[in-house]
Amino acid sequence: MSERLCKLQQAMLSVGLNEHPQSLINGELTDGPGADVSLIDPFTEEVLFTYADADTDLAKLACDAASATQPGWAKGMSAAARGQVMQDISRSVLSHAEPLAQIEAIVAGKPIRDCRVEVAKVAEMFAYYSGWADKLHGEVIPVPSGHLNYTLREPLGVVFQITPWNAPIFTGGWQIAPAIATGNSVVIKPSELTPITTVALVKLAEEAGLPKGVVNVLCGLGPTAGQAAIEHHAVRKVVFVGSPETGRRVATAAASNLKPAVLELGGKSANIVFDDANLKHACLGAQAAIFSGAGQSCVAGSRLLVQRSVHKEFVDMLANGMNNITLGDPLNENTEIGPISNARQFEHVTGMIKQAANEGATIHTRTKNDGCGYFVPPTVLNDLSNNATAAQSEIFGPVVTAIPFDDEAEAIALANDTNFGLAGAVWTSDVGRAHRIAEAVRAGTFWINSYKAIHVSSPFGGSLNSGFGRSSGTDALMEYTAAKSVWLDSAPTPKIAFGYVS
């Protein structure tokens, strides 16, 4: 057994898991009956585990368990008690932060220091939504008929969630916390490539007091376990985080079963730099926007729009700064960029760089680390138009396309010349212009003189190929509940006349 696998299994045992990936159904760690799925260490390219797909059988069991436990979670205990359980979950996550971060670093290939931050944010998610559990209520509406009319916010029931491989535990907490705060039960299917931390999170939640069966985790494939869960009669809503291509299939499958969906998909976000900006500050922001997490972020600033008068200076500054970024073992404390998370994505990213070269790009990059691993070094693609493939298609790697613009109007036009609508940013010292750009650019999240600041209390989502619906803040509470309108006739006893009530 390799040292890395040994460390991984020790971390798994410390959070209540067995020594290989398993689904968690009604509180029980369960092996699947389906085809084998392999987990590959993206740093060593060695097989960590082979486990069996949950397949349709476990999907049905998970949905049945969620359906059976949801009424008790929603009505069998007070909303305040639900909130207290979520506070306890938050504390448990923090107390197990290091093994959770180690699992994430090895399996997903994320730098350990980034994983620690994300685990802390997951704890914050449960703490934040715990406070909302007993504060979600309806309203009284002054209808003109004289009735007393009021609304209730009710949980949907069973929610099915699908999360991606680029931020497994972060997106797991991001989706689970608001869903259970509002009284729903959950069936969640993390990516088959990175399932372990999601199972660990729910196992710790159960040990902290979450009733078994409120959240069930499927370790398996989309066409089998995922499709079966979408079709299950108990599921009332489908939530998907991932690529636009898969998102379309999920939305179509949900719609064919008359179920609503929330889609949090990709982006091709414009990071706009004007010549009056603090260029050094903007350069550091641009590096973080695209190179952190090896560019595997839906909000990555993958289109760098720079005013023509400083375009060359800024690109040179960015290219030179790349040489100071440390690539390496995700478990190394000094590593700033780890490998691409899986072989398929590695081939996609490297293929996009080759295609950009064929389309005439001037490529600024640095030497790849020696040895194995799915490493793509930080790369800047210059001398391409906004119509180039690399400027229009999501690369999802540490690769940015640098495009010049002349004035404010052109910057806005370029920023909106995309089929995505997720995020964006502007760097300028002109306050008025900053607000004009923020209003004009089509994006669900927009930053001024910063990038990638997000918080669980703020709504997050996009439009067009970036999806629809919102998955954080109080907006998420609305996504996971439905309004019921209640009418009480407050008039005196009605009189019967001419065969009808008046």
Image (cartoon, helix red, strand yellow):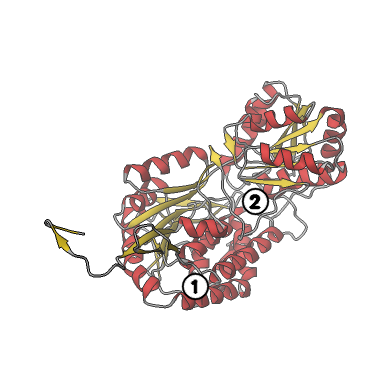
Residue 253, relative to residue 4: is it above or below? above
Question: How many angstroms separate mark 1 from mark 2 (CA)?
Answer: 44 Å
Helix, strand or loop at label 1? It is: loop
Please state, as top left, top right, bottom left or bottom right, where the C terminus lies in the image: bottom left
For residue 454, what is the image quadrant? Answer: bottom right
Assign the N terminus to one quadrant of the image. Answer: bottom right
Q: In front here: 300 or 258? A: 258
Q: Residue at x 83, y 41 (%)?
A: 430
The amino acid sitting under disc 1 is Asp
- At x 61% / y 31%, what residue is drawn? 418
Q: Is residue 37 left or right of residue 443?
A: left
Picture quadrant where residue 473 is located? bottom right
Disc sitting over residue 43 in the figure: 2
Between 190 and 174, the one lying in front of the other is 174
**In this view of the protein, can residue 195 be seen by the observer?**
no
Q: What residue lies at 64% left-to-right and 61% top-to-bottom?
A: 118
Residue 130's image quarter? Answer: bottom right
- Closest to the observer, 20 or 75: 75
Disc nearer the start of the sequence (1/2): 2
Within 10 Å of disc 1 (Cα), the crowding (few <14, some 14-19, many 20+) is some
- Amino acid type of disc 2? Phe
Q: Choose mark 1 or mark 2, whichever is in front.
A: 1
Q: Which residue is mark 1?
A: 134
| Residue 187 position within the rendered picture, expressed as x and y whole percent measured from the top left | 41, 60
Q: Position of residue 99 (x, y in %)?
A: 61, 68
Residue 326, which numbered label?
none
Q: Residue at x 50, y 48 (%)?
A: 469
Q: Is residue 345 above or below residue 143?
A: above
Residue 180 shows in the view = yes
